[in-house]
Amino acid sequence: MIKIKNVSKQYVHRGRVIQALEQVSLDIQAGEVYGIIGRSGAGKSTLIRLLNLLERPTTGEVWLGGACLTSMTEAQLRKQRQKIGMVFQHFNLLQERTVRDNVRFPLRLAGLSRREQNARTAEVLEWVGLSEHIHKYPRQLSGGQQQRVGIARALANDPGLLLCDEATSALDPETTQSILRLLLRVNKQLGITIVLITHSMDVIRQVCDQVAVIERGRIVESGAVVDVFLRPRDEVTQSLLSESSLDTDGWKVMAAEVPGVLLRLSYAGEQTSAPVLSQLSRDLNLDISILHGAVSHLKQMPYGQLVISIQGPAFQLPEVQQRLQAQGIFVEVLRT
């Protein structure tokens, strides 16, 4: 659905050239929830604004559904943007307009009649659970309700693509969960492709199918979320994963006092409930201590990590690694 081909973006500030993006290429398939993650200043906000050409690339091409946006006139772009909804970090609502008027705004720009505007506005507000707030003003709503208004406004023109620019970072944890559930429903029930930028691996874990990691304007790693979580290759990805709620540092104190080889095991799917370690211990006469463990979900797939110490009279690390990897478990040696 979306192709970004060798896109670079430069800014000139006080006579100095700033390279915001450099040779970025991405393929995003229809129906996916695609996450773009990076730290502040990595270039992710610039990248998402290139997808609807709110920012024009210095070089490269942006394609949407077989149409090259970068070769379009402004008039053509305005029409194309009606197929793209956008949800912002700080809601970007018109404070002096009611909820209905905020949602109705893009419909008016699209040329719908007043009757059509009102009907569609009522429909999307009911869909996001805000029908009873239709005549309120943004200041009368909670942060989560304001973001739901923003989502309703983004859905008003029945887009095929929804861009979410840090849509949950201004919300508390409980409200974040409700907004993520709503976005999943948008994707699943309406079939809308979602591109979501965030600085949180936990957000990626809960809602995304694919992920790209951006650092200093470059994509350093990309792929299916399960592959990136199980087998992170780049140091930036590994650092972001270490900050996930699945990972804590408490085991490190214990590990210093426990003998043996230290391994981190990452696994997904059926392996989360399989008795892999008990079988390994019996077969090879090993002593295995679990120092840290967590199980969660990558979207709907069970996923977990364990930190273990392992020792035994006939312990051979290559044999253990081979057995675990044969069962689809990613093994990282933390200490030999």
Image (tube, helix red, strand yellow):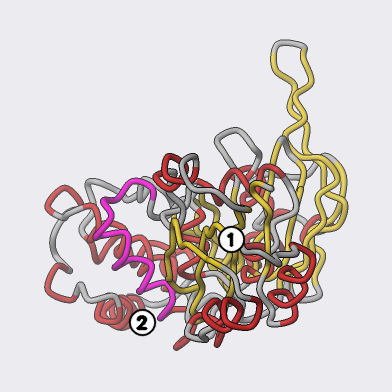
Q: Quadrant of residue 216?
A: top right
Task: Name the residue at the top extreme.
Answer: 14
- Frontmost residue, 262 versus 158: 262
- Frontmost residue, 216 versus 88: 216
Q: Residue at x 77, y 30 (%)?
A: 19
Across and down, in percent, residue 46 comes to 64, 42
189 above or below 63? Answer: below
Across and down, in percent, residue 202 comes to 46, 58
Q: Residue at x 55, y 87 (%)?
A: 270
In the rendered structure, the answer to whether residue 186 lies left or right of residue 39 reads: left
Residue position marked by numbered label 2 in the rendering: 116
Pointer 2 or 1: first along the chain? 2
In the rendered structure, the answer to whether residue 139 lies left or right of residue 95 reads: left
Q: Quadrant of residue 331?
A: bottom right
Q: Residue at x 53, y 85 (%)?
A: 191
- Magenta span has 174? yes
Q: Residue at x 68, y 75 (%)?
A: 324
CA separation, marks 2 and 1?
Answer: 67 Å
Per the image, label 1 sits on a secondary structure element best described as strand
Across and down, in percent, residue 217 comes to 73, 39
Look at discs 2 and 1 and give the one toward the viewer. 1
**Tag 1: amino acid:** Ile
- For disc 2, the neighbor class at 10 Å (few under 14, some 14 to 19, many from 20) is some
- Frontmost residue, 162 versus 42: 42
- Magenta span has 159? no
Q: Quadrant of residue 209?
A: bottom right
265 above or below 242? Answer: below
Residues in magenta?
A: 169-185
